[in-house]
Image (cartoon, helix red, strand yellow):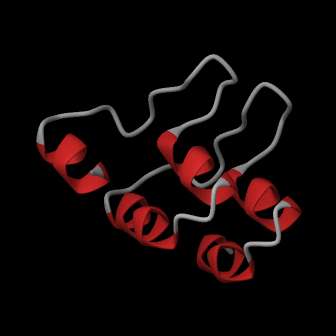
Amino acid sequence: MVKLLLEKGADIECKNKDGRTPLSWAALNGHEASVKLLLEKGADVESKDEDGQTPLSLAAEMGHEAIAKLLV
């Protein structure tokens, strides 16, 4: 789904009401394949949500170790 949205021109850095980007959301929810794709497409790993959390801090908080390693 992420690949299709990006192919159709979706904004890789759009933010939801919580200030989370697609990369933040994927990291938070453990979607490793989406994280990899978003990183390949140049997603900002330093983006912060309204609470100041980055994709890395969200992945670590949720225990998604493999994703955290991708984001380091």
Q: Which residue in the rendered view is the most extreme toward the top? A: 17
Q: Is residue 24 left or right of 68 when viewed as pictured?
A: left
Position above or below: 37 against 6: below
Residue at 53% in and 50% down: 23
* Total marks placed: 0
Residue at 42% in and 62% down: 34
Q: Residue 57, how many percent across, how many down?
A: 81, 57
Q: Is residue 54 left or right of 35 when viewed as pictured?
A: right
Q: Residue 52, how many percent across, how many down?
A: 84, 35
Quarter-of-image position of residue 50: top right
Residue at 38% in and 56% down: 42
Q: Which residue in the rendered view is the most extreme toward the left? A: 8
Q: Quadrant of the C terminus?
A: bottom right
Position above or below: 66 against 55: below
Residue at 32% in and 32% down: 11
Q: Residue 15, how many percent across, how many down?
A: 53, 26
Quarter-of-image position of residue 14: top left
Q: Residue 24, how many percent across, how many down?
A: 61, 47
Position above or below: 38 against 20: below
Quarter-of-image position of residue 25: top right
